[in-house]
Image (cartoon, coloured by chain):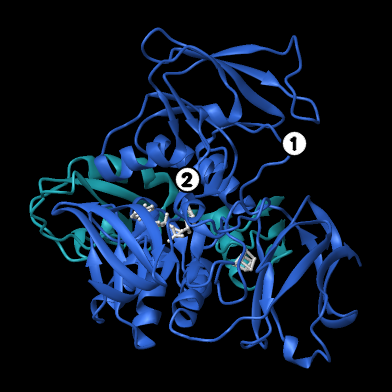
Chain colours: A blue, B cyan
Amino acid sequence: MKYDVVVIGGGPAGLASAVKAWQGGASVLLIEREAKLGGILKQCIHDGFGVVRFGEKLSGPEYADRFVRALKETNVQVSLLSFVTRIIKQDNMYVITYVCKEGVQTVQCDRIILATGCRERTRNGIFINGDRCAGVYTAGSAQNLVNMLGVMPGKRVVILGSGDIGLIMARRLTLEGAKVVGVYEAKPTPSGLTRNIHQCLKDFDIPMYLSSTVTRVFGKTRLERVEICKVDEHMRPIAGTEEIVEADCLVLAVGLIPENEIARDLNVPIDGKTKGAIVDQNCQTLVDGVYACGNALHVNDLVDYVSESGETAGASAVKNHKRDLREIKTVGKLLYAVPQRLDVNSDVDGVIMYFRASEELSDQRITVRADGETVFTKVYGKLLPPEMERISVDFSKAKSLGEITVTLEDK
Amino acid sequence: MQMVCIVCPNGCRLNVEQTEEGIVVSGQRCKRGEAFAIGELTDPKRSVTSSVRTTVKGYPVVSVKTDGEIPKSKIFELMDMLKNVTLHEPLPIGSVVIGNLFGTGVNVITTTQMEETDE
Ligand SMILES: Cc1cc2nc3c(=O)[nH]c(=O)nc-3n(C[C@H](O)[C@H](O)[C@H](O)COP(=O)(O)OP(=O)(O)OC[C@H]3O[C@@H](n4cnc5c(N)ncnc54)[C@H](O)[C@@H]3O)c2cc1C
Ligand code: SF4
């Protein structure tokens, strides 16, 4: 079989991109490894999704359902329970190998959209010592157990990490009858939205401990205790501050990283800061015909922007032109900015850029320049690394598009 | 008194004062903040999301939510009610699972489209 576009991943990014590519006239196959579409949203049963896009507070499954319905209106072919194992380039086409119920299949296509989402950091990624016992879960796997399988991961729970996913799991486990002993955060400030600290922790009297981390776990077969330690400003444990807390479950909510195994196989250059592919404003990677969107591109905090990038990728995957790429350099206190390239041979008005500050900052100015000329500038009262910002930049006003920079500096 | 508005992701920090003329709120970026603060002092309410068990293949549990807000003090009572619910057939998204909670007119509805699967 041969398709114009193959989308890998059936989360919100993949769904949005498949619909757009089909609307653009392409034949599309969407490959998803799970039994149902919707990606991680299926298990994010709390509400707060879609505020930007629909002006409504939807739960994750409701948000996903709108896009699944839109997909069903199209002729996009969907292959569920299908896991992509290999992609090679052959005679100017991509050959995708995937495993499904029918066995090992191959399809050919001109364009690939990577919408494989992100993965969670695990215990190995953050260096917790101690016994190899059961009862240590990533927040996503704990969320899957409770919300999809109806199984509780434990009765006395310690949560490491104060990002939104950690806060939401603290409330969810409490509602289901567990005792959440506390949420521990190595940084001196919480990572999640203030709103979630109030509605998830304060509402249920769950304590939060800042500048603290889990350094060791104990338990013969099942987790019994964890060792908590205060940390200094470099996040190193302070000797003598160790404290033992009884718990049969440790939930790690310590960060997400784009899933990029397939991109690596295709030799797609990765941005060391986003850990996702380097792309132009059309979500095309540096490898012609390979696109990336959603959390596979960079970890988003709002699903609305995930859908937006999916649509960008889907709409551009049906276009044909020779690219002329310019680097977009980041200057100053930026953690990252996406896209990292500007294709001056395609539309350069209304270029959507996402960025994060490298630290908590106040009174900042972001400026986008082309050959020294300012094409966009905006002032922010407050910027926080967990909150991604979105700007729309019109490069068509610029006299020339040689050296392009994005700068974050004091106002 | 200090409060954080939880109505939208902005999370405005509100200053709330009881005066002779009534409750005076400042710090809100929109008028919903004032209504929230007054509600918090007089009759705090929350929406709740959770899940209920099912015997339908492929759905050990299915996600639900309240389609409006219920008194905050009733949250755990609602959780106990949800423990006693089991669904036996695949329901379309938005189906009412428990109607008119605590006489408030608020219902518990499903938030996942259940489909018959053959796996
Ligand atoms: C645990 C967790 C909780 C979150 N909570 C929130 C939240 O509360 N609010 C919010 O706005 N955002 C939340 N997010 C962020 C959320 O991931 C994004 O909003 C959005 O769901 C990302 O969409 P996506 O399509 O990029 O990825 P995903 O939804 O992760 O979808 C990726 C899909 O690709 C499939 N896939 C991956 N690799 C392969 C392969 N090799 N072959 C076939 N299929 C493959 C996966 O099965 C999955 O279905 C959360 C993320 C996580 C991990
Ligand atoms: S006051 Fe308005 S803007 Fe501020 S958090 Fe509440 S609803 Fe949002």
Q: Eyeballing the image, is B106 above or below A371?
A: above
Give the residue type that dot 2 points to: Arg
Give the residue type that dot 1 points to: Pro
Mark 2 CB in 8 Å range of ligand 1?
yes
> Can you identify the residue that label 1 sits on?
A188
Mark 1 CB in 8 Å range of ligand 1?
no
> Can you identify the residue that label 2 sits on?
A119
Picture quarter with the N terminus of chain A: bottom left
Residues packed near mark 1 inside 10 Å, few (<14), some (14 to 19) or many (20 plus):
some
Q: Tell which residue pokes out farthest to the front in this image.
A: A91
Q: In which quarter of the image is residue B60?
A: top left
Label 1 marks a residue whose chain is A
| Nearer to me, A319 or A191 | A319
In the image, taking residue A285 as reference, residue B25 lies left or right, namely: right
Mark 1 element type: loop
Give how far across and how far down residue A32 sits, in percent: 30, 58
**Figure label count:** 2
Picture quarter with the C terminus of chain A: bottom right
The numbered disc on residue A107 is none
| Viewer can see residue A409 | yes
Question: Which sits earlier in the primary sequence, circle 2 or circle 1?
Answer: 2
| Viewer can see residue A51 | no
Q: Eyeballing the image, is A165 above or below B34?
A: above
